[in-house]
């Protein structure tokens, strides 16, 4: 479920930035200020994602570690 949520979020962000780029190409909106704000936003989302990934991979280990390995034949 977590992966599905992240994939939906990334798809939504991709759609959003694509629409901004198309509007900028056709000069409907001023891209200069929006472009820098978008890049800063992507950077902040990247850093937050890295921190969350670290938290889930190190602190919240799955309960599957307690399962003994299968016996060798």
Image: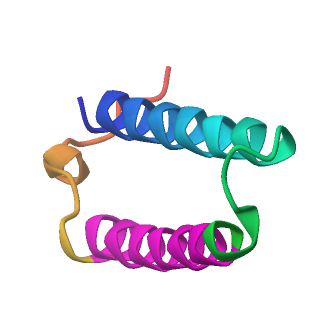
Q: Main secondary structure of the magenta part?
A: helix
**Residue 64 as seen in the image, left or right of residue 24:** left
What range of the chain is rendered magenta? 36-58
Q: Quadrant of residue 61?
A: bottom left
Instruction: Name the colour scheme.
Output: rainbow
**Residue 63 as seen in the image, left or right of residue 1:** left
Decide: is 40 above or below 19. Answer: below
On whether residue 63 falls in the magenta region, the answer is no
Total marks placed: 0
Residue pictured at 50% horizontal, 41% vertical: 10
Q: In the displayed image of the protein, which residue is found farthest to the front?
A: 28
On whether residue 41 falls in the magenta region, the answer is yes
Residue pictured at 62% horizontal, 46% vertical: 17
Q: Quadrant of residue 69?
A: top left
**Residue 5 as seen in the image, left or right of residue 6:** left
Residue pictured at 14% horizontal, 49% vertical: 63
Q: Quadrant of the N terminus?
A: top left
Q: In the displayed image of the protein, which residue is found farthest to the top?
A: 73
Q: Nearer the viewer, residue 11 or 17?
A: 17
Q: In the rendering, at what x and y percent does residue 35 appear?
A: 70, 68
Q: Nearer the viewer, residue 17 or 69?
A: 17
Decide: is 5 above or below 46. Answer: above
Q: In the rendering, at what x and y percent does residue 62 appear?
A: 20, 52
Q: Quadrant of residue 28?
A: top right
Q: In the rendering, at what x and y percent does residue 36 appear?
A: 67, 77
């Amino acid at each position: 479920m977590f992966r599905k949520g992240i994939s939906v979020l990334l798809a939504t962000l991709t759609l959003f930035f694509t629409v901004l780029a198309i509007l900028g190409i056709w000069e409907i909106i001023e891209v200069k200020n929006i472009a820098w704000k978008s890049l800063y936003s992507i950077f902040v989302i990247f850093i937050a994602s890295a921190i969350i990934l670290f938290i889930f991979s190190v602190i919240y280990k799955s309960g599957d570690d307690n399962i003994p390995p299968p016996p060798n034949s």
